[in-house]
Image (cartoon, rainbow, N blue to C red):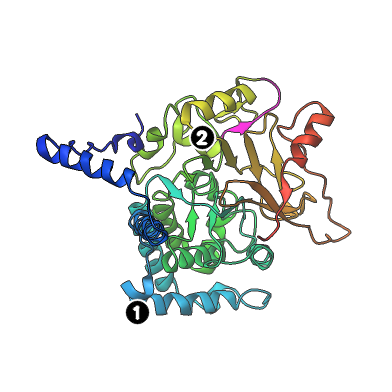
């Protein structure tokens, strides 16, 4: 049973004997008395004050680093200022503004924050959900110019911050500093590229070695092993990098994953990072990746019912529009950098959820590629095989409009 179900409160005992009779008599007298306008206003005022008081008591207290630790807040403000100076500055990189020692201090600080969060970190709406970034620091900042920035906006990232692109350390440092400075406004999940077996091959290992030395790569791995694996928005929208798993029987299954952890070659951790949706059928299939599974519409519908959620948002695969609605409208794939690896002509997008959990998207069109680039259109992954139904599914997600 979910831990959310264990918060049952014992009702207050009913008044006994003469006290109950007196209260009943008092209620009867009130009912027989015509209320004056002043009495009605007083009652409404009391109810309004009580309602506001209840809201304040229920609302979680926001963490304010500036009050809790002014020196760290000042340091983070300075770090963010320096990191933002790298945007649109092709002549500089992170080695010009941060030492390896400072980066390690930031890593140690943010991994403590990750460990304070649940492995299923929970966030409220409104929120914007962001997919793969893949070390495209400049494109990530261009995306922020479009969708807004922390702390004005609340973000949940679905992983894959490194590899493939040139500025993975810059991406991580900007997001880590934002997490330290505004921990309840940004949530960072782990992707399959935040594992040593992957990022040693696809670019991050070499980037660390060239910029600071191999030791820093190891420091990042210890931090990745502490990142949350999944997110839950308003208790109704489940987020992860990859997808569902046959081992996922309840949300507590994710909450109870011990950390630090390093995914091996199979099991729940691998599936959360690696699994993919498909439109080839309703059930489970062996993955064309050679790791984890592919899962169909029936699995998604059953999973949503089992886990008590309405929607699943995941990343992990490049899609041409930057977002794709799976057949059945219970799963969305989001990819958030354009022209992935200069091999595709894809747009970037984010999924927006308002306070009522209504879905919309913001899209950043890809800049033109050099004429020599042999880029192609990204293939569809799990849309309906019926063209009309696929178009209707796509159009069910409207463009974002500010309230």
Q: Is residue 133 magenta?
A: no
Label 1 sits on a secondary structure element that is helix
279 falls in the magenta region:
yes
Identity of the residue drawn at 22% across and 39% down? 24
Image coords of residue 32 (percent x, y):
32, 44
Magenta stretch bounds: 275-281
User: How many labels sit on residues?
Assistant: 2
95 horizontally vs 9: left or right: right
| Prevailing secondary structure of the magenta residues | loop
Residue placed under numbered mark 2 in the picture: 309
The answer to whether one can see residue 398 in this image is: yes
Q: Is residue 248 left or right of residue 154?
A: left
- Mark 2 vs mark 1, foreground winner is 2
Residue 243: x, y in percent? Answer: 56, 35
Q: Nearer the viewer, residue 331 or 191?
A: 331
Residue 7 found in image quarter = top left
For the point 44% across and 71% down, the residue is: 100
Q: Which mark is residue 100?
A: none
Query: x, y percentage for residue 170?
Result: 55, 66
Answer yes or no: is residue 296 visible: no
**C-alpha separation, residue under disc 2 versus residue under disc 1:** 40 Å
Work out which residue is located at the far left of the displayed protein and give it: 17
The residue under label 1 is 71
Up/down of 19 relative to 57, above or below: above
Q: Nearer the viewer, residue 314 or 155?
A: 155
> Looking at the image, is mark 2 or mark 1 earlier in the sequence?
1
Nearer to us in this view, 167 or 151: 151
């Amino acid at each position: 049973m979910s831990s959310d179900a264990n918060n049952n409160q014992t009702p207050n005992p009913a008044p006994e004997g003469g006290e109950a009779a007196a209260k009943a008599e008092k209620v009867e007298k009130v009912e027989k008395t015509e209320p004056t306008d002043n009495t009605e206003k007083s009652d409404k005022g009391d109810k309004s004050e009580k309602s506001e008081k209840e809201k304040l008591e229920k609302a979680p207290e926001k963490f304010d680093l500036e009050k809790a630790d002014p020196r760290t807040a000042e340091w983070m403000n300075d770090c963010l200022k320096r990191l933002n100076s790298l945007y649109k500055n092709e002549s500089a990189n992170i080695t010009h503004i941060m030492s390896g020692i400072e980066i390690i201090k930031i890593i140690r600080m943010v991994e403590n924050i990750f460990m304070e969060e649940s492995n299923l970190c929970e966030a409220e709406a409104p929120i914007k959900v962001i997919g793969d970034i893949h070390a495209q620091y400049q494109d990530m900042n261009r995306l922020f110019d479009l969708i807004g920035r922390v702390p004005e906006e609340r973000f949940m990232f679905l992983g894959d911050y490194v590899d493939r692109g040139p500025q993975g350390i810059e991406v991580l440092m900007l997001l880590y500093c934002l997490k330290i400075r505004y921990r309840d406004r940004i949530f960072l999940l782990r992707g399959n590229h935040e594992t040593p077996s992957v990022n040693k091959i696809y670019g991050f290992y070499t980037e660390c070695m060239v910029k600071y030395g191999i030791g820093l790569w190891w420091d990042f791995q210890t931090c990745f092993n502490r990142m949350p694996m999944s997110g839950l928005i308003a208790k109704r929208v489940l987020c992860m990098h990859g997808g569902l798993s046959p081992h996922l029987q309840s949300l507590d299954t994710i909450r109870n994953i011990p950390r630090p952890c390093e995914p091996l070659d199979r099991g729940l951790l691998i599936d959360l990072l690696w699994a993919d949706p498909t439109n080839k059928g309703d059930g489970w299939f062996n993955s064309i990746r050679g790791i984890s599974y592919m899962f169909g519409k029936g699995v998604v519908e059953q999973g949503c019912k089992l886990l008590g959620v309405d929607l699943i948002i995941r990343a992990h695969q490049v899609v041409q529009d930057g977002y794709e609605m799976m057949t059945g409208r219970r799963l969305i794939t989001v990819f958030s950098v354009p022209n992935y690896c200069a091999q595709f002509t894809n747009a970037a997008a984010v999924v927006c959820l308002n306070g009522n959990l209504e879905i919309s998207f913001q899209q950043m069109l890809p800049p033109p590629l050099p004429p020599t680039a042999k880029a192609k259109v990204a293939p569809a992954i799990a849309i309906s095989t019926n063209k009309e139904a696929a178009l209707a599914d796509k159009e069910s997600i409207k463009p974002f409009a500010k309230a």
